[in-house]
Image: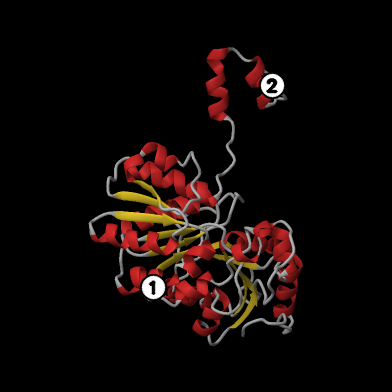
Amino acid sequence: MTAEMTLETALTTAPATTLATVAETAPRAPLSGRDAYRDELTALAADRTDLVCLEADLGGKKHPFQIAHPERFFNVGIAEGAMVDMAAGLAAGGYKPFVSTFAPFAALRAAESLKLTLGYLNAGVTVVAPYAGVSGAWFGTTHHCLEDFAVLRSVPGVTIAAPYGEAEMRAVVRAAVRDGGPHYIRTGRNASYESLELPDGEPPLVNWEFTGDPDDVCLVSVGEEGTRLALAARAATGASHAHLVYLDHAHLSAAAAELAGRHTRFVVVEEHRSQGGVAEALALLLPGCEVTSVGAGQGWPSTGGDHQEVMAALGLDLPAVLAAVDGARHGRPAPGGAR
């Protein structure tokens, strides 16, 4: 077999005894966030009989948890509030329920149940919310969710995470199982990314992907698309880049102290509205620093397009991030930036 052979050629010409070896050694594309969640939870449930999975009619016919552990899988249909209420009862009974539905239906439609279950009862329920931001672009405004950080960050005691890539999602799911407290985990639709390097396999409080001049601007990335854009902007500008995974008040307060120890000017990139987002929170936590927000603006997309097209229509694209970095460097914050 020559080095020039493609995997397809190898699989069609190699002896049968070597096909498995070829397939196993071929690089695998990373899973999307929601698929990584399902795969990790299914694997953990093999040894943890207290893990239970609930979905609101979005798991499909081949959900891996349902296949592996059918007695602990519940598809409740389009009844998101009832699903969270059921999870509260399961948690009271000693189980560790993970519930999943589209972010707009979790954070907004089931907001009261989340407030009571995750907040007032402090129940050990983990909510995994795909289709966050405008990742459900073609489905229209009803399936967009640019307000979930604002809602969940206002509920005391909830750990909030927005992992970037398969490895981060798996680590966040494992941490939620270990911790046992209320969690909200935000992810996209089908996009898949290679996570940043994780020291010891766990996300650090602040992941310094690149450290530049302390007197220069520092990009702060949040979530899948915010991190994708920040990585591209860092490559183009040479600015420092700090990546955040955990976004609740307790984690952000500690992260703010670490950020302020290295920089005084920050550009936060997130697929969320500026109101109630991470940039606004950091602006309050970093009173001696300048914090500029690059987010999803104030619009309500009403026309079709793919994920990145809808983000661009809302003012969240690479040119907007580059303009914000340039403005912060020269004392001209981008319009709408938090300071």
What is the residue that sits farthest to the bottom in this orientation?
287
Secondary structure of the residue carrying numbered label 1: helix
Residue in the foreground of this view, choosing between 306 and 269: 306
Q: Which element carries disc 2, helix, strand or loop?
A: helix
Q: Image point 28% across, 60% down: which residue? A: 89
From the viewer's perspective, is residue 179 above or below residue 3? below
Indicate the amino acid at tag 1: Lys
The foreground one among 29 and 107 is 107
Q: Where is residue 10 in the image (x, y as percent from the top left)?
A: 65, 20
Q: Residue at x 71, y 63 (%)?
A: 310
Q: Is residue 188 at least partly visible in the picture?
A: yes
The x, y position of residue 96, in whole percent, is 31, 55
For label 1, the residue is: 115
Q: Can residue 255 be seen in this view?
A: no
Q: What residue type is labelled 2?
A: Thr
Residue carrying label 2: 9
